[in-house]
Each structure stands twice: as structure tokens, then as C-alpha cells.
Image (cartoon, rainbow, N blue to C red):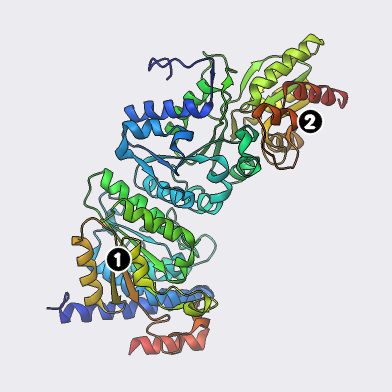
Amino acid sequence: MPAISAAANEELRLKAKKLRQDVLTMVHQAGSGHPGGALSVLDILVILYYKVMRVDPHNYRDPQRDRLVLSKGHACPALYAVLADKGFFPARHLKTLRRLGSPLQGHPDMHKTPGVEMSTGSLGQGLSVANGMALAARLDKSPRRVYAIMGDGEIQEGQIWEAAMTAAHYCLDNLTAFLDYNGLQIDGWTRDVKTLEPIVEKWRAFGWHTLEVDGHDYASLLEAIRRAQVNKGAPTMIIAHTVKGKGVSFMENQINWHGRAPDAAEYARALKELKN
Amino acid sequence: MAEKTGIILPAEMATREAYGLALRELGRRRDKIVVLDADLSQSTHTALFAAEFPLRFFNLGIAEADMIGTAAGLAANGYVPFASTFGVFATGRVYDQIRNSVAYTRLNVKIAASHTGLTVGEDGASHQTLEDIALMRVLPNMTVVVPADARQTFLAVEAVANYEGPVYLRLGRPKIPRAVPPEMPFELGKAQVLREGSALLLVATGIMVGRALQAAAMLDREGLQAAVLNMHTIKPLDEDLLIAMARKTGAVVTAEEHSIIGGLGGAVAEVLAENCPRPLVRVGVKDTFGESGSPEALLQKYGLTAEDIAAAGKKALRKK
């Protein structure tokens, strides 16, 4: 039996379509930003925020909430779209992205944006922070869980592997990490810039319970997360195979959409596709 | 706190040793105190805390960037982490982690660095951080504390734990004599007048405070009354007291076991230049790296003795 019903799956699919539109609207209006990685990570955020994480937008500082660290901070338009949709802050803020005085900074700021758990943007730092949060949950004897999302290029940062060793050493089974494996980084394909493979073997060798899924398939994502939740004694890494620019035909797998905003014509085309 | 807890600190003790004792004491009273180290817990004396509170001690191995990030995560979720390693690894090596995960986030992380300055000694230049005060001072939200002796360290650890926000606490390797009267309280950001004097002002921090007092005694024998100010908090700098005493004396010397660029000397120069320009001479390491040698031999070679401070005082007076 799939981890998710056909009806629930359809509901999430429609939700994601709407959120992808929000992402493009935000980045288009801001005139800059990172649509490619935001679109690739979006379905991971959707499954977490709509089916998994215990968070309350109206009591978002509840000490017992689950935590998410978006270590690939540049994908924040996706997170902002989700948080606004969930009601952490008014949706009208979305159009202020990257503007002076906006609560929505170019990279996440935990003090400016309700629901953002950690300020990120300088790559490679979020997994260590998530480890600290997982250790805090353990010290508190709390069942709360910690989630971390990394970009694939991001794991070229050495600190990720320091943190990978730490999470395994401290047996942080309350931590689930995701790798948004879209295969592209600013200078090209990860396999050309500096290969990450063999990636599953790397995480396993570092002591992680490692799973591989289609990062746009809700049933697979949810099943992997459930397996992470019951796994004891080791942190879980979910290698999520994703498509950069997912959902917009002319952005998919195109590196030039890593950090560029769509102009008016491109935006209209993208929105038309997403509304179909 | 030292007295309250019945701990009697000897007349000579390293500030890192006092840190270890203070941390353990703090751990006994506050269960949110956690300690992180990067494979140097014997040297930083966090091993004392680890022995008594193994569940609240995290050794991150030789992975300082990860240590700072982990501390940030613990702080974000209600704990008060003290992260320790040698100064050179606790600052420059992890600068971006401190900048983005600690200072920008205003998280309640205490970075307590031992083995700072030239007095690391024989390990040589690679391990002698002479720029850490400058690096930490320039970060918004960061508080920078350099205790003058063991007892002050004991008090500073308590004050730092009570303060909500990022702190860099600079500690040293060698045993140093008492410099601050035992009854003197400690308040973050409030410099201490250890000696009154009207001819000139000696502003010192860390191990140089004791030496500044010696220099003042030397100058006194020559009929020059120097005031001595213990600037244990470099940031926020006690500007009011500094300006008042600079006005009163008319000549200023700074003394630090650090580069003369960007540290105490730099901070004092900035404040004086904007508020009350007076002749200033900076005692410290003069834009160079250190080398291997005994701590005392290094302090002599690089011009950080009491005699050097006294000579700097006379130089400042000549500029009056």
C-alpha cells in the first residue's frame, strides 16, 4: 500500500503547483533570486510541512515543535512560499522578497521571518546546526525531530562531512537530512565541477542510515521519512533525486536558472505551464 | 563566586585553569550549561566539566567549524554552550561559522579560547593568535572579554553565562600572578581603575594588566604617576571611562598580547581620535608573526615587558 492515498497525493500536487507559482512570482517581482534550486527542493518542503512536521503557525515558538534547517539557504523562496501558505506570516509579504525592510531576506534570517529556524546562506553550516538542535532535543528528552536540507553542490563543503561524522558518532536518530540532488551547481553539472559520487556509499560509510528516493514523489518521500522516524541509533540521510527548475519546462535541468529571475515573458510562460 | 563556592585560587594560576574550574562550578548550578571542545579538553581544562557532566559535554573531535555550528544549534534550542579550543582555531579558522551562525544570528554561544597570544610559547607562530581580538571585535553583536588574572576569569565566566548573546572569552596558557584586587567585582563592559595617576594613562588587557601595574610602579620611582585601567572588556569598550581618564592624564599607552592593529590599541585609538585626541603609544606585537620560544623570552623579544610599557609611557609623555 502506498504511504499516501491517491486523493491526498493529488491535493499535495495541486498545492505544489500553487507554491511553485508563488516562488516564480516572488523571484520575478524581486528581479533576482534562485528559482532553480527552489523548484527542485519544493516537494521535499511540501511533504514535510503538510504531512510530517509538528509545527503550529500560530504558536511557532512552541519549544516542542519540530525543527527544519534549510542549509541551502538560497532556496528560501520555496520555504517562504510554504510558510506563508501555512500562515506563519501574511502572504502579502511574499511580494517584498529581497526589498529593503522586507521580513523576507535574500537568504533566510531567523529573526526576521516567523517559522525560519536558522539563518543560513553561507553553505555547509546547516547540518552542524541541526546536529546541535538534535542534541538539545535529546538533552530535553523531547520527542521533537530535526530536519535538515542540503544542496548537492553544498556537500562539497568540508564542514558537511565533519557534521556527518558528528551525527553518526552521537547516534542522532532524531535527525533526518535530505540531499536535494538535482545534479547542478553554479558552474555546471556536479559530476563535472567536482563529483559527489558514489554518494549513497559515502553517507553509509559515514555511518548514516541512507535511503534514495525520487524527490518529487510524495509517497516515496513519505515512506522514507517514516522509515527514518523508526530507525534507531543512527541519523538518516534521504538522497532525493530531483530536477533543478522542476515544473517549468524551460527551466528544468538548465543551469542558467540557478540564480536568475524570469523576465515578464518568461514569467508569463512559466505561470501558464503551472496553471495547466 | 570563587569565595561563595569555597574555591580558593592560588596567587598564580593560568586563566584557562580558572576557566575549567568556573565552568564546572557553573555546571553544578545550571543544567542548561553545555560544553563543547575540539580534542583539546585537557589543555582548555573543559575536561573538568566533562568528567562531572559527561552528558552535557560534546567532543567534536578536530572539527572546529562543526563545533561552532553545533554550539549554535544548541543555543538556538535553549542551551548555553561554551565552545573551547585554542584561540587560533577558535577564531580565524572558523571565522565564517562565527560570523554567520553565531554573530549574525545573535545566538547565545560562548567561544572560550585558550592558548592565545605569544605565551603559547614553544609551539610557535602557527599556534600564536595575535589577531583574534581584532577578528572578533569587528563582528556586530559580539562581546569580547579578556580577563586579567585567574580570579577575574572565574568572575567573567559567570558574567558571560548570565549575559544573553555571543561572547568571545580570551584565555591564556601560562600561569600568571594576580593583577586585580580580590575584592573587586566584575561587570561586563565596565573597565577597572587599578591605580590612580595624573601624568599618563596605561590601558591594558589580559596578561598585560599585571605588567602595566609593574610599569606604573617603575614610572612612580621616577616621579611619574601613571593611572592603570584594566580594559577586560574590549567590546563593548568602556568609552566613557576611557575618555574621562585620557582627558585627565593627557597621554595614553595601550598594552596587549596581540597585534597593535585592530585590538585594544586599535579600539582605544578609534575612541580617542573621535572624542579627545591625545598622544598614544601602542604596546603589542608590531604587525608580525611570532615564533618558537619560552613565553617570557617571546614577551621580551616582541616588546611586551613592563619595561617596554614604561618606555612607551615616557614616549607618550614626550609627545604631550
The chain to which mark 1 is attached is: A
The image quadrant where one finds the C terminus of chain B is top right
The chain to which mark 2 is attached is: B
Q: Disc 1 residue type?
A: Lys
Q: Disc 2 residue type?
A: Val
Residue A25 in view of the camera: no
Looking at the image, residue B146 lies above or below residue A34: above
- Is label 2 in a helix, a strand or a loop? strand
In this view, the residue in front, B309 or B227, is: B309
Taking A250 as reference, is B53 left or right?
Answer: left
Residue at 29 percent of width and 39 percent of height: B55
Q: How many marks?
A: 2
**Which residue carries the number 2 mark?**
B281
Residue at 50 percent of width and 81 percent of height: A257
**Which residue carries the number 1 mark?**
A86
Quadrant in the rendering for residue B119: top right
In this view, the residue in front, B149 or B251, is: B149
Residue B33's x, y, as percent? 36, 36
User: Do labels 1 and 2 touch, CB within 8 Å?
Assistant: no
Q: Measure how far apart labels 1 and 2 are at the Cα level.
A: 60 Å
Looking at the image, residue A102 lies above or below residue A251: above
- Is label 1 in a helix, a strand or a loop? helix
Q: Residues within 10 Å of mark 2 (few under 14, many from 20)?
A: many
